[in-house]
Image (cartoon, grey):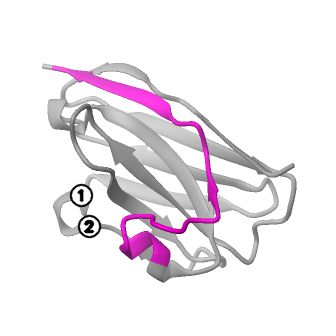
Amino acid sequence: QVQLVESGGGLVQAGGSLRLSCAASGRTFSSYVMGWFRQAPGKEREFVAAISWSGGSTYYPDFLKGRFTISRDNAKNTVYLQMNSLKPEDTAVYYCASDPRLSVFRARGDGMDYWGKGTLVTVSS
């Protein structure tokens, strides 16, 4: 059974940092693109970051560049999201995702092969 399990969410003050982790199990994800989405209450799901199977290429929406960094450790089947300079508008449930196709990440995650259950990040002002 394939599972993506997120951890590392919590409550942080504005300007602070958090590091999310996503541990994958049930198959080898070394050939998969892995990434993160988020969904705030009352809002649509939005793309946060993605990383190629080798880790050599990373992708972010323009509004997040410079604050968030995605990385992966294929030996551990784990992907990370380092979030710095957090703002209250970053408050959301963050979901780990995985698919062989980068295009799926750019299509708001529609058709994604695998999703985690999410971890809540709350940024207080």
Amino acid of disc 1: Leu
Question: Which residue is painted at 33% across and 42% down in the image?
Answer: 39
Q: Nearer the viewer, residue 19 or 109?
A: 109
Q: Nearer the viewer, residue 92 or 58?
A: 92
Which residue matches tag 1?
Answer: 64
Mark 1 and mark 2 in contact? Answer it, CB < 8 Å: yes
Q: How many marks?
A: 2
Q: Is residue 15 above or below residue 58?
A: above
Q: Marks 1 and 2, how far apart in space?
A: 6 Å
**Quick one: label 1, few (<14), some, or many (20+) residues within 10 Å?**
some
Residue 4 location (% of width, % of height) = 69, 46
Q: Secondary structure at mark 1?
A: helix
Image quarter hosting the C terminus: top left
Q: Is residue 118 above or below residue 69?
A: above
Residue 2 location (% of width, % of height) = 80, 52
Question: Does 75 appear in magenta?
Answer: no
In the image, is 41 to the left or to the right of 113? left
Q: Is residue 34 above or below residue 13?
A: below
Q: Secondary structure at mark 2?
A: loop
Q: Which residues are magenta?
A: 104-124
Which residue matches tag 2?
Answer: 61
Question: Does 114 appear in magenta?
Answer: yes
Residue 108 location (% of width, % of height) = 37, 65
Residue 88 location (% of width, % of height) = 17, 30
Question: Which residue is painted at 76% across and 56% down in the image?
Answer: 77
Question: Which residue is painted at 86% across and 61% down in the image?
Answer: 27
